[in-house]
Amino acid sequence: MAIGEIIAVIVSISSAMVIFALQRHQNRRDKATDERAAARQKESMLMLSMMMANNKMSYATAIAVKGGKINGEMDEAMEEHLATKKAYYAFINDYAMTQLNGAQK
């Protein structure tokens, strides 16, 4: 085997190794980006649920003030508000734990 052939093989192998490393790094970045996008989407849905629960609470309050008495709508609105608040806090805690565990690696 001539020196030129040996150099060509070495260049080919080293190029393949560099491309493999770059692709591996890009795949990790893509995965992290996808995870962040999924977390943002979940948070947006939870925020929308909280906003809807807040609107329901406001509407029930307006009806109660207008009628001069508390009705079943207020109880339902309060339950929905508490449920969405609990779901949002669970999401925040899970996300925080994920971030803390990721930082420890």
Image (tube, rainbow, N blue to C red):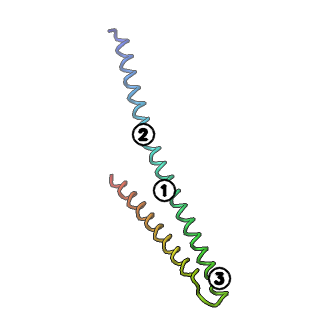
Q: Is 23 placed above or below 97 here?
A: above
Q: Is 81 placed above or below 17 here?
A: below
Label 2, on which residue?
25
10 Å neighbourhood of mark 2: few (<14), some, or many (≥20)? few
- Frontmost of labels 1 and 2 is 1
Q: Is residue 64 left or right of residue 92?
A: right
**Res 92 quadrant in image:** bottom left
Marked residue nearer the N-terminal end (1 or 2): 2
In this rendered view, identify the residue nearer to me: 7 or 101.
101
10 Å neighbourhood of mark 3: few (<14), some, or many (≥20)? few
Q: Is residue 84 left or right of residue 65?
A: left
- Disc number for residue 39: 1
Q: Is 68 placed above or below 52 here?
A: below
Looking at this view, name the residue that lies furthest to the bottom: 68
The quarter of the rendered structure image containing the N terminus is: top left
Label 1 element class: helix
Label 3 element class: helix
Marked residue nearer the N-terminal end (2 or 3): 2
Q: At x 40% / y 32%, what residue is drawn? A: 20
**Residue 80: image location, x then y, percent:** 52, 73
- Disc number for residue 62: 3
**Residue 24: image location, x then y, percent:** 41, 37
In this rendered view, identify the residue nearer to me: 42 or 97.
42
- Kind of residue sitting beneath label 3: Ala
Q: At x 49% / y 53%, what residue is drawn? A: 38
- Kind of residue sitting beneath label 2: His
- Disc number for residue 74: none
**Res 13 quadrant in image:** top left
Cα separation, mark 3 vs mark 1, equals 34 Å
- Frontmost of labels 2 and 3 is 3
Q: At x 36% / y 16%, what residue is drawn? A: 7
